[in-house]
Structures are given as structure tokens and as C-alpha cells.
Image (tube, rainbow, N blue to C red):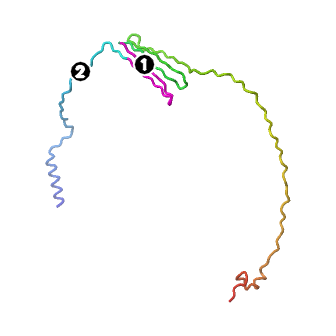
Amino acid sequence: MIKIVSILVVLVGVARAGNVEYGYAASPQIVAHAPAIRAEPYDPHPQYNYGYSVSDPLTGDHHNAQESRDGDLVRGSYSLVEPGGAIRTVTYTADAINGFNAIVNRQEPQVAVAQHVVAAPPVRVAQPVYAAAAPAYHAAPAYHATPAISYAGSIGAYGGGYGAIGGYHH
């Protein structure tokens, strides 16, 4: 019975499949109307100014920047504190004729002048004198031989040796 049902299922599947062609199906055509693209307004003489400054004593981050534009001429500068404490400042200009030009200025950190300190001559401290104590020798302890003890003769006196005193009696 199972064989018959399986064969029927296969035959129905083949009959419904028809001719199978392999390849890509045509994608559905989606027609959407895109909004019209508008040209952005053109400014023949652009102008802007901006600037910022950061001063974080916790991390030691200190820097600033500013820039301005007037038509095709851009001017600006930025400044930062280098790890060694020097301040680097870059001033730049850019225009259609000369291109980009930068001037880098590095200002070393301001260090207070240390006053010359004259050290006092070394002081000699008297060192204590330690005398080594003479080793103390003592006579070696005397060892005396102990007399040999024999238990052979006393076994019978205590009743055969079954106890310290009195022994074991039947």
C-alpha cells in the first residue's frame, strides 16, 4: 500500500511540474516615479567662519582651530600642545592662484630658570667600631655508659612474664 501511495505522489508531482527550464526568471518590473532632482542653490561668493578650542587638564589635551572663507580665499590656523610641552601653531591660506600654503611655528615650553644651588660639603660621620667577641668554648658534655640490664633471670619471678607485676595466673 505504501509503495502505491509513493508512486502516485511521484507521478502527480512529475505531471504538475511540466517542462522545467533551468535559468533565471525575469525580475518583476517595479515602476516608481523618482522625485525630480533639484539643483542646489549656487553661491558665487561663499563665506563662513568657524572655530573651536579644547582645554582638558585631566587628560592634558589642549588644542584649538579657526578658519574663515571669503570667496575663493580660505585662511585659518590650528594649535596644539605636543607631548614635550612645546606649542605647535600652523597658520595656512589657500586660494585658486597660490594653492595651499602653511607656516609651522613651534614655541618651546616656558621653563623657569633654576637657581644655582651650592651643595654643602659632605659631612663625615664617625663610624662605630665593632670588636669581635672571642668565641667561648665549653667543655663537651660527658657521656657515661649505663649498666647492662638483663631480663633473662627475672621472667620466672613474675609468673612467666605475662604482666609487669604478678603476671598471669591459671
Give the amino acid type for the residue marked by disc 2 in the picture.
Answer: Arg
Quadrant in which residue 34 is drawn? top left
Q: Are marks 2 and 1 in contact (CB under 8 Å)?
A: no
Give the amino acid type for the residue marked by disc 1 in the picture.
Answer: Gln
Q: Of helix, strand and loop, which mostly describes the magenta segment?
A: strand
Query: Is residue 140 positioned above or below 79 on the image?
Result: below
In this rendering, which labeled residue sits more in front, label 2 or label 1? 1
The residue located at (38%, 17%) in the rendering is 49
For residue 58: magenta?
Answer: yes
Q: Which residues are magenta?
A: 49-70
Tell me if 11 is positioned left or right of 150 in this view. Answer: left
Quadrant in which residue 126 is drawn? top right
Residue 96: percent from left, percent from top: 38, 12
Identify residue for label 2: 38
The residue located at (18%, 35%) in the rendering is 28
Q: Earlier in the sequence, mark 2 or mark 1?
A: 2
Observer-nearest residue: 46 or 143? 46
Identify residue for label 1: 66
Observer-nearest residue: 152 or 52? 52
Residue 9: percent from left, percent from top: 16, 53
Identify the secondary structure beneath mark 1.
strand
The residue located at (17%, 43%) in the rendering is 20
* Residue at the outermost bottom position: 170
